[in-house]
Image (spheres, rainbow, N blue to C red):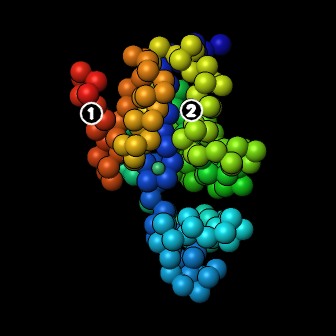
């Protein structure tokens, strides 16, 4: 039996590992008759949104772009447990898996948000999930990758652990979110 990994990489999906702007825009045109950006789609009723996301990840999946910088980080992270965590509903889980599969990304697990947790914010759910996984107990170090500084701050302020490292993903740059002294 292999030794359990002691280091965990937790990677956000949208705008961190993948860029879906183009595929969503095309799918929104097909569903609503008008091209909409990610922000506009996010404001649509859940039913419509689900239709658009579904189409974006099937018919228009070839317009989804994998972040090359993040793919590289995953590729050179051997001996770690590499987990993609997304607040997307589980209805998109199979699409996410096949996308990761088709690009041969070095990912061991994809965690999606169960429908019963759709009532809380994405970050509240991620924090809950981290605690549920007992991640701080099970791993020696945890690296978080996210495209939003407010998300990173939220986790830092709630977890308050020196096992945590945070990386901000800005397009194709992956940079430490805080300086070595822990200040913003
Ligand atoms: Mg994101």
Q: Quadrant of residue 162?
A: top left
In this rendering, the answer to whether 158 lies above or below 154 is: above
Q: Which residue occupies the foreground of this view, 78 or 65?
A: 65
For residue 178, side relative to residue 121 (left or right): left
Q: Quadrant of the C terminus?
A: top left
Who comes first in sequence, dot 1 or dot 2? 2
Q: Which residue occupies the foreground of this view, 67 or 114?
A: 114
Q: Which residue occupies the foreground of this view, 145 or 61?
A: 145
Q: Residue at x 57, y 21 (%)?
A: 135
Q: Quadrant of the N terminus?
A: top right
Q: Quadrant of residue 126?
A: top right
Q: Quadrant of residue 76?
A: top left
For label 2, count other residues whose C-alpha is less than 10 Å away and answer few (under 14), some (14-19) or many (20+).
some
List the residue tagged with mark 2. 127
Q: Secondary structure at mark 2?
A: helix
How far apart marks 1 and 2 lie (CA) works out to 20 Å
In this rendering, the answer to whether 8 lies above or below 123 is: above
Q: Residue at x 28, y 24 (%)?
A: 182
Q: Secondary structure at mark 1?
A: loop
Residue 80's label in the rendered image is: none
> Would you say residue 170 is visible in this rendering?
yes
* Residue 84 screen position, x and y as percent: 54, 40
Q: Residue at x 59, y 87 (%)?
A: 33
- Count up the numbered dots: 2
List the residue tagged with mark 1. 184
In this rendering, the answer to whether 32 lies above or below 73 is: below
Q: Residue at x 26, y 27 (%)?
A: 183
> Would you say residue 80 is visible in this rendering?
no
């Amino acid at each position: 039996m292999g030794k359990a990994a002691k280091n965990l990489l937790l990677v956000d999906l949208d705008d961190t590992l993948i860029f879906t702007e183009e595929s969503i825009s095309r799918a929104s045109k097909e569903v609503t008759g008008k091209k909409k950006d990610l922000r506009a789609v996010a404001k649509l009723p859940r039913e419509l949104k689900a239709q658009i996301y579904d189409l974006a990840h099937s018919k228009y999946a070839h317009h989804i772009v994998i972040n090359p910088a993040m793919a590289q980080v995953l590729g050179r992270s051997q001996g770690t447990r590499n987990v993609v965590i997304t607040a997307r509903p589980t209805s998109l889980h199979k699409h996410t898996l096949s996308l990761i599969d088709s690009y041969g990304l070095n990912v061991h697990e994809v965690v999606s948000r169960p429908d019963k947790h759709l009532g809380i914010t994405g970050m509240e759910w991620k924090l809950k999930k981290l605690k549920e996984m007992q991640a701080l107990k099970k791993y020696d170090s945890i690296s978080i990758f996210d495209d939003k500084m407010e998300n990173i701050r939220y986790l830092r302020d709630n977890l308050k652990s020196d096992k945590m490292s945070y990386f901000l993903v800005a397009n194709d740059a992956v940079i430490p979110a805080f300086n070595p002294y822990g200040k913003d």
